Image: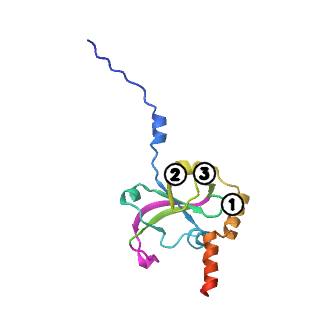
Amino acid sequence: MVNLIVVLPLKIKYTASIMKTKNSLMYSVTYENYQKNILDDKENKTQGSWLISQDMTQELKYAYVYLKNSEKMIVKKYHIEHFERNDTSKGYDDEGKQCFVFSKSEDTFFEYPHDIIQGRHYRNDEDMDSLPRLSESEIERRLELSRTTKTQSEANRKEKRKQTGTT
């Protein structure tokens, strides 16, 4: 009796593409929050406030900002140094959540090819960085669309304030 060992070639390229880590946090902001917190980097170089597992914070190296009501436009990429507990001295209210500290940010404008971001998504930075960039005129159009479009929840809050006399 003879034992045969058969060695099959591995499809390394295929396996590697499946195994790409989701090393990027994708989160959304309103136009107002884009103007206030994203357009110009905050002096303390922090962003966000989330409940994220310790394991996940170890995986995340980048964050991308999705602008609401902009036809799915990404507007910023952050290079994450680390996550830390929210600190009230940095303007955060909920010390039970975490923010990220970034070393670098880049204005980047491309269309997000997945579902609308409500909450957060996780993706791979290589996939995001390989997407085609938008033209200047398209960026301006989408920024204006986001600025002038009010979500139903925003309209409802304003109407409720008007009815109760709260401004």
Q: Between 159 and 29, which is closer to the camera in this rendering?
A: 159
Type of amino acid under label 1: Ile
Tell me, yes or no, whether the highlighted magenta stretch contains residue 152.
no
- Report if the CB atoms under discs 3 and 2 are less than 8 Å apart: no
The x and y percentages for residue 139 are: 69, 60
Alpha carbon of mark 3 to alpha carbon of mark 2: how far? Answer: 13 Å
Give the mark, 2 or 1, whose residue is nearer the N terminus. 2
Give the mark, 1 or 3, whose residue is nearer the N terminus. 3
Residue interval drawn in magenta: 73-95
Which scheme is used to colour this image of the protein? rainbow
> As drawn, is 127 to the left or to the right of 147?
left
Q: Is residue 3 above or below residue 57?
A: above
Type of amino acid under label 3: Pro
- Let me know if residue 167 appears in the view: no
- Dot 3 corresponds to which residue? 113
- Dot 2 corresponds to which residue? 125
Tell me the tag on residue 139.
1
**Foreground: disc 3 or disc 2:** 3
